[in-house]
Amino acid sequence: MIGRRYSPPLEVTAALAQAFGEPVDRIVVIENSLYARAHLGMSATTRPNRILLAGGGAAIGPIALNEKRESSRRLPLSITLAA
């Protein structure tokens, strides 16, 4: 899971907390994760309390919202972003 820890801006964290209906501060976001990059074709993957991004952290908002939608359908979750 080598990468760099990313701290989303407060406005992103607040918007995600509102969308999820619960605090999101316990979720660790890792950008440029080698583990996520190993999942070819995916922008990110998740593990308990972690979101591992293949690229930079700027995409965390759309990824987290997509995770919330998809998590009600299946687990474990891999995420593909539409461009």
Image (cartoon, rainbow, N blue to C red):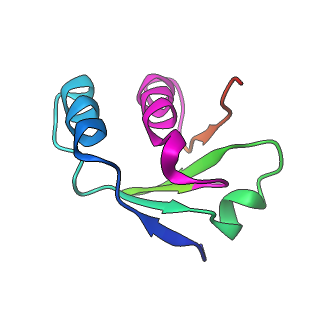
Q: Which of these two is toward me, 47 or 64?
A: 64
In the rendered view, does 14 fall on the left or right side of 72?
left
Callout count:
0
In the rendered view, does 74 fall on the left or right side of 83?
left
Q: Position of residue 14 (x, y in %)?
A: 20, 36
Residue at image location 24% in from the left, 57% down from the top: 26
Residue at image location 69% in from the left, 23% down from the top: 82
Q: Position of residue 39 (x, y in %)?
A: 77, 53
Q: Looking at the rendering, in which quadrant would you find the C terminus? A: top right
Residue at image location 26% in from the left, 24% down from the top: 19
Classify residue 52 by image quadrant: bottom right
Range drawn in magenta: 53-75
Whether the magenta-drawn stretch holds residue 1 is answered as: no
Residue at image location 35% in from the left, 59% down from the top: 7
Classify residue 18 by image quadrant: top left
Q: Where is residue 35 in the image (x, y as percent from the top left)?
A: 68, 66
Main SS, magenta region, reads helix
Q: Seen from this angle, which residue lies furthest bottom?
A: 2
Q: Where is residue 27 in the image (x, y as percent from the top left)?
A: 32, 55
Classify residue 34 by image quadrant: bottom right
